[in-house]
Image (tube, rainbow, N blue to C red):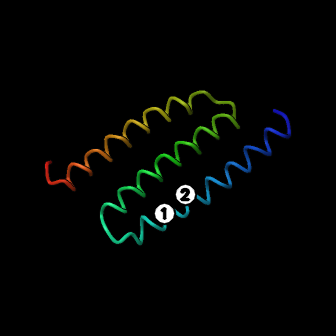
Amino acid sequence: MSETVELILYIAGIIMFLALSLAFVRFVFGPTLVDRTISFDVITVGSLAVIALLAVFYQREIYLDVNIIYGLLSFIAVVVVGKYVEKSL
């Protein structure tokens, strides 16, 4: 991998870390359950991006398979919490 690609991956990783940190702050200090649910979804989507970055950086395709399963489980979790908030569960 060229040095330019590695630099871009490092910069993207730093940006993702900052975004995940801000989402985690909202998750901890969110005033309502809806805020916490949305921040949980943002954290899971951000961690999916981090796993994809790691897959490219380490050139491991198995991480992408893990990413798909993790994304599906995350989607199901958010739908279940949304149903609970609506009181239709």
Rendered position, 72 above or below 43: above
**Above/below status of 42 relative to 55:** below
Residue position for label 1: 24
Which of the pair 56/46 is nearer the observer? 46
Residue found at x 59% / y 38% = 52
Look at the numbered discs 2 and 1 and tell me whether their residues touch, using CB distance below 8 Å. Answer: yes
Residue at position x 74%, y 48% in the image: 10
Residue 67 falls left or right of residue 84: right
The residue lying at 37 percent from left, 62 percent from top is: 36
Residue found at the very far right of the displayed protein: 3
The picture places residue 49, in percent across and down from the top left corner, at 57, 43
Circle number at residue 20: 2
User: In the image, residue 75 lies at what x, y percent?
Assistant: 36, 41
Horizontal side, residue 62 vs residue 13: left or right: left
Residue type at numbered disc 2: Leu
Name the element at disc 1.
helix
Taking 82 as reference, is 42 left or right?
right
Is 35 located above or below residue 31 in the figure?
Answer: above
Horizontal side, residue 1 vs residue 56: left or right: right
Q: Residue furthest left?
A: 88
| Among the 4 quarters of the image, the one containing residue 70 | top left
Disc number at residue 8? none
65 vs 36: above or below = above
Q: Secondary structure at mark 2?
A: helix
Q: Callout 2: few (<14), some (14-19), or many (20+) C-alpha neighbours within 10 Å?
A: many
Q: Marks 2 and 1, how far apart in space?
A: 6 Å
**How many C-alpha atoms fall within 10 Å of the one at disc 1: few (<14), some, or many (≥20)?**
some
Q: Residue at x 56, y 28 (%)?
A: 62
Give the percent coordinates (x, y) of residue 35: 36, 62
- The quarter of the image holding the N terminus is top right
Q: Position of residue 20 (x, y in %)?
A: 54, 57
Residue type at numbered disc 1: Phe
